[in-house]
Image: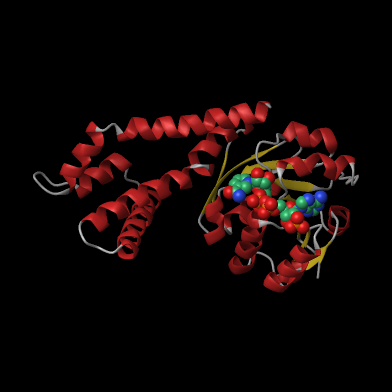
Amino acid sequence: MTVKIGFIGTGRMASAMIGGILSDGLYVKEEIIGCAPSENTRSRISSEFGIKMYKTAAEVAKLTDFLVLGIKPVQVKPLFTEEGLELGAKHLVLSIVAGVKIATLMGYVPDAKIVRVMPNHCCLVGEGAAGYSGGPGVTDNDLMKVKSVLNSSGLAVEVDEEDLDAVTGLSGSSPAFMYMILDAMADAGEMYGISRDKSLKLAAQSMLGAAKMVLSTDRTPDELVDNVCSPGGTTIEGVRVLREAGLKNIMIDAIKASIERSIEMSEE
Ligand SMILES: NC(=O)c1ccc[n+]([C@@H]2O[C@H](COP(=O)([O-])OP(=O)(O)OC[C@H]3O[C@@H](n4cnc5c(N)ncnc54)[C@H](OP(=O)(O)O)[C@@H]3O)[C@@H](O)[C@H]2O)c1
């Protein structure tokens, strides 16, 4: 069977993507390969997913033209300068390496086609949100392949590369902000006698349901707020408190701070 996709690095994010591809049925296990330097990771990934694992990226790049670069930013340079990984015009590279620009990767492999992706860690549960951007030479067909892979563990939108810093703040970092909101909601539930476990479940399901309402209806968040509120009712009281406390500006400031840090880091 032809190998369809190869993972260079099979850590947390790549594993989540492999799991998504398999459960979505995009590729079967014989069509996926990966590599990791440590024997421990290779045997763990082989037994978890049943895919064939190799020690080096060069072995993977020989067997498939579609590669996922899932290593840490500091591991990128040695991959090309010390291990001497060479990629040609036939290679399509989906890079999830945070902060490493398409131009930087093309400095190492000028002929390869690069698609830079900013995923988020919710891809671990098949609900990731990713922004992606294709570099020079990337075709519509290449972008379709990338989108299919990303969609198997969540939702993906195409953006300009310069917007990936904004994606980093908006969807890369924001799960942490949502966890903070959920934690506060659970605190409130507990104050009124519901156990932490049950409070957290109710809060998390409410957030999930609200997100689904936004994604699956054509109503704006403002319209949906109005839908839940009735004059003199319970929700409007809570909405008043959030508006008076400046929730909107707090969220914008949090996301802006993450975006600014992402811009700073990609310039370092
Ligand atoms: N975690 C997030 O929420 C998140 C969100 C967005 C983007 N990202 C980006 O996603 C990338 C991966 O993150 P992660 O959390 O999945 O990292 P991770 O768990 O540390 O995984 C890194 C993987 O790379 C492998 N590796 C290291 N050097 C290698 C080499 N020379 N050749 C082949 N494989 C090599 C490691 O193998 P061993 O196990 O053998 O050491 C490991 O499997 C990072 O660049 C990160 O910035 C992460």
Residue drawn at x 20%, y 57% is 192
Place of residue 106 in the rendered image (x, y in percent of width and height, measured from the top left): 80, 35
Place of residue 146 in the rendered image (x, y in percent of width and height, measured from the top left): 66, 50
Residue drawn at x 58%, y 37% is 159
Picture quarter containing residue 30? bottom right
State which quarter of the image contains the C terminus.
top right
Extreme residue toward the left, this view = 232
Place of residue 185 in the rendered image (x, y in percent of width and height, measured from the top left): 30, 51
Task: Report the front residue among 116 and 148.
Answer: 116
Whether residue 176 is visible here, answered yes or no, is yes
Whether residue 8 is visible here, answered yes or no, is no
159 in relation to 205, above or below: above
200 in relation to 78, above or below: below
Its colouring scheme is secondary structure
State which quarter of the image contains the N terminus.
bottom right
166 in relation to 123, above or below: above
Task: Report the front residue among 79 and 156.
Answer: 79
68 with respect to 207 (left or right): right
Label tally: 0
Task: Report the front residue among 142 and 22.
Answer: 22
Residue drawn at x 38%, y 56% is 208
Picture quarter containing residue 260? top right
Picture quarter containing residue 249? top left
